[in-house]
């Protein structure tokens, strides 16, 4: 069977067929990303793939890498939700919470998970009467909710029974303290559920039109994949899905276990460090749209440089972060030489593309109308880009005369010649790349369509080794196709400190209850067993077959009068495995019999 990997990037949507046993790419397709409806670009990409690839095996699974969650947060396109804070009002120092309605009800635990204030469940009735008609989901986050989640669980059950709408709890994503971060994570997730549901429904409809009924997986922000069902419940975990797929693809295409993966796309460049073959992960949670979360995601740097970055030439040369359609895509040489203009607009429609001058656009649309059209990409700016410079150098196909005409006009305005101007622009391009790279290692892995042209020169500038693998232009989709499943669970064991206490007691804080033990080793053993079981259950629900689990223990102690006192221990269980369709295929391989 084949694994179908799909990546929706800022400029293009790529799809690949991969043989999961050999990790060989069988075929690939490309299509422009349709931001008004991502499913259209996905369907066009799959159509391009299937029209040029002979299917010798059935498609056994589909894995999707998508920027939808990240972009929805950054562009404030998540749906309206109500955040219920249990036991604590918003603090003055908190940044704005991502919820249209924030309401507080009574109920509180202490740091050991003991109830200090009972839950005021009746306070939910007037809140629901007030807000339910205006929201599409709810989030619940309680004071020390990770030490005892029972209040959050009761609120979730109550709201679901009354409204039937999705409810997300802060303890579902982390065992770490931090009421603000957990509240942000829960609220963002609640707002993303309708958004991800619409995308996955559309993707499944598109797949059905091609006769593809294979199970659907989604790439998470840590480089693992999850089943469609889990992605629908926890879409916040798919933030940075694109850069994560890039890093995985860079590793599998090169075998470099320790390297800096640079994915140079049309709009942005993503930089991710590989450590022992895995993307480096932010330990305390990702920052998304300026909001601190408790989402496990890769430590990625994304900046506005790509093959389609806008180049502005004046006393200085600016590259990006704005995007433009390259001049090389159109026959513009005559228009450029006649008018002296070097930037235009293109209006997209079902009938085709229409190039418009700035004057025509200014007379046709108001500033607000133009801004909305640009945001929806119904109209796009056409101007000089790094891709045009590559075309001028003979490294990319395109209308070289359009590019040459623009460079001639710009050179004349700046009092130089075309060659000198081109060299200045190339220096500015390299500066835009190198100033965003800080890496002490030796190897740079370049992926993305422009990587073969830019990464070798960048590596020389930074005195690094480099490798640009075959199929680098579809490395993201390849990474999506070969990702594995990994689910982790943290269980905290706390020591109960009481002055009048005669016997030691240790509390195990699980996602469903708190357990008390008199001996530390008993508590640790229980925590390990529970963590392993939960990790395996989550991995299986994420789509893994026969996951393997490993645990680690981190103790926190204090020194008092040269004596070590145990405070708490964090038990982490990680369950990993292949997606079920891949595991079945491996069993069928004669080499494994």
Image (cartoon, rainbow, N blue to C red):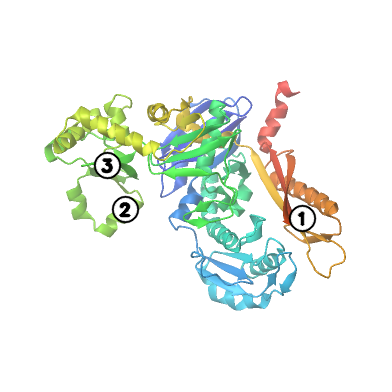
* Horizontal arrangement in the rendering, residue 557 relative to residue 481 (left or right): right
Number of numbered discs present? 3
Q: Position of residue 82 (x, y in %)?
A: 55, 68
Q: Quadrant of residue 506?
A: bottom right
Location of residue 553 with respect to 96 vertically, above or below? above
Q: Quadrant of the N terminus?
A: top right
Q: Which secondary structure, mark 3? A: strand
Circle 2 residue: 373
Q: Is residue 277 above or below residue 174?
A: above
User: Quick check: 545 left or right of 3?
Assistant: right
Mark 1: give few (<14), some (14-19) or many (20+) Cα within 10 Å.
Answer: some
Q: Secondary structure at mark 2?
A: helix
Closer to viewer: mark 2 or mark 1: 1
**Is 574 or 542 nearer to us in this picture?**
574
Residue for point 47% across, 29% down: 472
Q: Marks 3 and 2, how far apart in space?
A: 14 Å
The spot of residue 76 in percent (x, y) is 44, 58
Asked if the residue at tag 1 contacts the one at tag 2, i.e. Cβ–Cβ closer than 8 Å, the answer is no
Question: Nearer the observer, disc 3 or disc 2?
Answer: 3
Q: Earlier in the sequence, mark 3 or mark 2?
A: 2
Q: Which residue is identified by label 3? A: 382
Of the numbered discs in the image, which one, if any, rests on residue 566? 1
Q: Residue at x 53, y 37 (%)?
A: 273
Front residue of this view, candidates 150 and 234: 150
- Dot 3 or dot 1, earlier in sequence: 3
Whether residue 434 can be seen here: yes
Q: Is residue 73 left or right of residue 552?
A: left
User: Which sits earlier in the primary sequence, circle 2 or circle 1?
Assistant: 2
């Amino acid at each position: 069977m084949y694994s179908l990997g799909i990546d929706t990037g800022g400029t293009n949507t790529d799809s690949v067929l991969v043989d999961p046993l050999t990790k060989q790419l069988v075929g690939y397709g490309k299509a422009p990303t349709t931001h008004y409806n991502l499913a259209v670009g996905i369907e066009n990409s799959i159509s391009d793939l299937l029209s040029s690839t002979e299917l010798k095996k059935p498609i056994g699974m589909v894995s999707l890498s998508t920027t939808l969650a990240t972009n929805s947060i950054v562009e404030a396109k998540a749906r309206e939700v109500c955040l219920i804070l249990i036991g604590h009002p918003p603090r003055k120092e908190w940044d704005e919470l991502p919820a249209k309605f924030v309401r507080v009800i009574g109920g509180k635990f202490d740091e050991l998970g003991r109830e200090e204030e009972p839950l005021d469940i009746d306070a939910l009735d007037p809140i629901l009467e007030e807000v339910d008609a205006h929201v599409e989901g709810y989030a619940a986050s309680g004071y020390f909710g990770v030490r005892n989640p029972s209040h959050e669980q009761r609120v979730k059950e109550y709201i679901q029974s009354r409204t039937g709408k999705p409810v997300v709890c802060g303890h579902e994503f982390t065992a770490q303290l931090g009421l603000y971060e957990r509240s942000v994570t829960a609220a963002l997730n609640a707002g993303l559920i309708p958004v991800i549901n619409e995308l996955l429904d559309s993707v499944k409809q598109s797949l059905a039109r091609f006769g593809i009924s294979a199970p659907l997986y989604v790439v998470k922000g840590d480089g693992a994949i999850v089943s469609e069902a889990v992605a629908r419940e926890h879409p916040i975990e798919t933030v940075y899905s694109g850069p994560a797929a890039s890093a995985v693809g860079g590793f599998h295409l090169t075998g470099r276990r320790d390297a800096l993966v640079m994915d140079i796309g049309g709009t942005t460049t993503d930089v991710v460090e590989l450590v022992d073959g895995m993307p480096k992960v932010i330990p305390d949670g990702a920052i998304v749209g300026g909001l601190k979360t408790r989402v496990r995601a890769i430590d990625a740097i994304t900046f506005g440089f790509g093959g389609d970055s806008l180049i502005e030439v004046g006393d200085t040369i600016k590259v990006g972060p704005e995007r433009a359609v390259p001049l090389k895509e159109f026959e513009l040489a005559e228009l450029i030489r006649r008018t002296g203009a070097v930037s235009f607009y293109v209006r997209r429609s079902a009938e085709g593309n229409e190039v418009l001058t700035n004057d025509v656009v200014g007379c046709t649309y108001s500033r607000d109308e133009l801004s909305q059209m640009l945001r929806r990409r119904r109209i796009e700016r056409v101007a000089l880009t790094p891709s045009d410079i590559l075309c001028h150098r003979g490294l990319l196909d395109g209308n070289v005369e359009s590019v040459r005409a623009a460079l001639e006009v710009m050179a004349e305005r700046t009092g130089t010649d075309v060659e000198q101007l081109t060299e200045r622009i190339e220096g500015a391009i390299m500066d835009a790349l190198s100033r965003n790279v800080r890496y002490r290692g030796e190897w740079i892995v370049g992926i993305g369509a422009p990587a073969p042209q830019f990464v070798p020169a960048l590596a020389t500038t930074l005195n690094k080794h480099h490798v640009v693998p075959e199929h680098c232009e579809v490395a993201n989709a390849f990474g999506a196709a070969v990702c594995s499943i990994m689910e982790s669970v943290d269980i905290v064991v706390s020591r109960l400190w009481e002055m009048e206490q005669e016997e030691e007691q240790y509390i195990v804080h699980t996602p469903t209850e708190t357990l008390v033990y008199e001996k530390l080793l008993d508590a640790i053993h229980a925590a390990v067993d529970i963590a392993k079981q939960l990790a395996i259950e989550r991995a299986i629900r994420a789509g893994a077959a026969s996951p393997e689990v490993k645990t680690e223990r981190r103790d926190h102690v204090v020194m008092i009068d040269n004596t070590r006192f145990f405070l708490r221990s964090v038990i982490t269980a990680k369950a990993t495995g292949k997606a079920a369709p891949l595991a079945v295929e491996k069993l069928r391989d004669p080499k494994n019999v």
